[in-house]
Image (cartoon, rainbow, N blue to C red):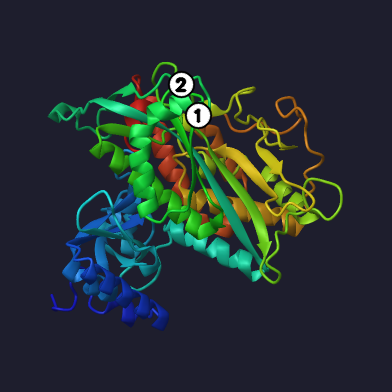
Amino acid sequence: MPNNAGHGRSDFVERFGLVNEDGRKKNTEVEEIVSVQQLDVVRLSFADQHGILRGKTIMASDLRSAFDSGVSMTTTLLAKDTSHKTIYPIWNDGGGFGLEEMTGGGDFLMVPDPSTFRILPWVNGTGWLQCDIYFPDGNPVQFSTRNILRQSVADLESVGYKLVVGLEIEFHLFRLRDKPLRPEDAGQPGSPPEVDLLAHGFQYLTEIRADQHEPIMEIIRRNLLALELPLRTTEVEFGPSQAEVTFHPMGALEAADTMVLFRNAVKQICRREGCHATFMCRPHLPNIFPSGWHLHQSLTEIKTGTNAFIPKKNGDLSLLGLYYVGGVLKHARGSSVFTTPTVNGYKRFKPFTLAPDRAVWSRDNRGAMLRAIGGIGDTSTRVENRIGEPAANPYLYIASQIVAGMNGVENKLDPGPPSQEPYRANSPALPQSLMEAVSALREDTLFPKKFGEDFVNYIIKLKEGEIARFLSESNDWEQREYFDLF
C-alpha cells in the first residue's frame, strides 16, 4: 500500500475532485483544532439506510490521510436490515443490486465533511466527523440517504426556496437494571436490556416529574450544549419515563445531521451513566406510552428572506403553504415508510390519542396529522407534521416532506378547508402496518421519480426483510428488534 493511501485509496479526494478550495481550508482548520486540543482519536461515521451511525475510529495523526484518501468501509453495510443481517446476495454478480461495486463485499469510502466536526464531551480526547460516501470510482453511493436529502434541498433551492425545520422529539429514559451480556444474549438482534422507570409519569409537564428526570437530563443537556446543538427545551411528556426535546429552527440538512448526532449522543451518554435511552416508538413494557417525532416546517423565499407560509389575507396559511399541505397530505400514505419505518411505529396511529390516524390538516389541533400554526403577521407561521416516529431516518423523513410538499405546489393541490374534527374527517386513513405502508409506497409514483426507482426498491426490499422476520417470530420481536437499536 502506498504510504499516502492510509485508510483509503491514494489521493482519492483530489483525483475525483471531491473537494474545493473552501473545503481544503476547512479541513486544515479541523486539523489545527485537533492538534491544539491534543485529541487522541477521531471517530468517522456515516448515517446508514436506517439512520444509524456506522464508522471507524482513527488515530488523530491519520486525519490528514482521511481527508485526502478517504476511509474504506465494507459494502455489506449497505445491505443490512435493522437486525444487522445482510439480506442481499452479496456473493452473486452485482451483489443482488445489479451493481459491480456491490459484488463480494468490496469497499466504498467515507470522506469526512469538515463542517460537521465536533469534540465529543463525554469521552476523553475524541473528535467526531460525519462523512459522505463514495464508490472507488469516485461516484457517490446512490444509497446514501444524506445525499438523497442534499439533492432534494438543491432541487428546492433551484425554484427559490429553503426549508426551515423545527425538531420536536419524544423518547424514553430508563435506569438500567440488567445488561444482558451472556453469550446466549448476543443474537441478531440481541436480548433487550432490562430497565426500571425514572418516574411514574402521568403528570404531564409537572415540576415534580421534571425534577425526577433531572439527574440524567442535566448530564444530557450539558453534553448537547457542549456539542453546540441548538437545544431549545427539555420537557416531561405524559408517559412514564418519557421525555421530549425541542431544537431551534434550522435548515433541512443541518436538522437531519442534528437529529442523527442527538440520538447517538443521548444513547451513548445514558449508557455511560447506567441508563438506557430508546427512540423506539412504543416499547413493549407495561403502562408505556408511544413516542412521536413532530416535524415543524416552513418555506423561506430565498430572494426576500421571508416566510412564504404567512397568509396575506384571512386564513391560516398562504396559498403556497396550502398547496404544500395538499402535497404532503396526498403523499402521506406513500411517504409513511420514510416517516414511520418500523413495524412498531404503526402501533401509535390510534384515534383520540394525540396521534394522527388519517391524512388530514387542521388549525392548531393536535389530533390532525398536519397542524397549522400562526397566521397573518406571525413570522413563525408553519406546519407541524405529527406522523413521524423518533426512529425514522431523518434524511428520508425530511426529504419526503420536501418532495411531497413541492409536488403540491407544482400541481396546485388544494387541501380543502381545515378539519375541526380530525378523527372524524372523511380523509384517507394512514397505513395501519408497515406492510400496508410498503404497498402504499409501491403505488406512489412520486418517490421513484424523485429519489430514483433503484433507491425506492432498495428501501422496500430492506423493509420486506424486516416484515418477513417479524411475521416468522412468535415472541417479543419488536422489543428485541428496536428497544436497544434506536
Identify the residue at horizontal 40%, vertical 47% (top origin): 262
Residue 391 is left or right of residue 9, and the answer is right
Q: Which mark is residue 205?
A: none
Residue 90 picture location, percent across and down? 29, 52
Identify the residue at horizontal 54%, vertical 57% (top origin): 250
Q: Nearer the viewer, residue 77 or 150?
A: 150
Identify the residue at horizontal 47%, vertical 43% (top origin): 392
Residue 34 picture location, percent across and down? 24, 68
Identify the residue at horizontal 82%, vertical 39% (top origin): 417
Number of marks in the rendered image: 2
Vertically, is 324 above or below 58?
Answer: above
Q: Is residue 306 visible?
A: yes
Q: Quadrant of residue 64?
A: bottom left
- The 10 Å Cα crowd at callout 1, few under 14, some 14 to 19, many 20 or more, is many
Secondary structure found at label 1: loop
Question: Disc 1 residue type?
Answer: Glu
Q: Which mark is residue 237?
A: 1
Q: Residue furthest right?
A: 313
Q: Is residue 445 visible?
A: no
Name the residue tied to disc 2. 201
Q: Quadrant of residue 218?
A: top left
Q: Nearer the viewer, residue 230 or 329?
A: 230
Residue 419 is left or right of residue 123, and the answer is right
Secondary structure found at label 2: loop
Residue 228 picture location, percent across and down? 40, 56
Q: Are marks 1 and 2 in contact (CB under 8 Å)?
A: yes
Earlier-in-chain disc, 1 versus 2: 2
- Disc 1 to disc 2, how far (Cα)? 8 Å
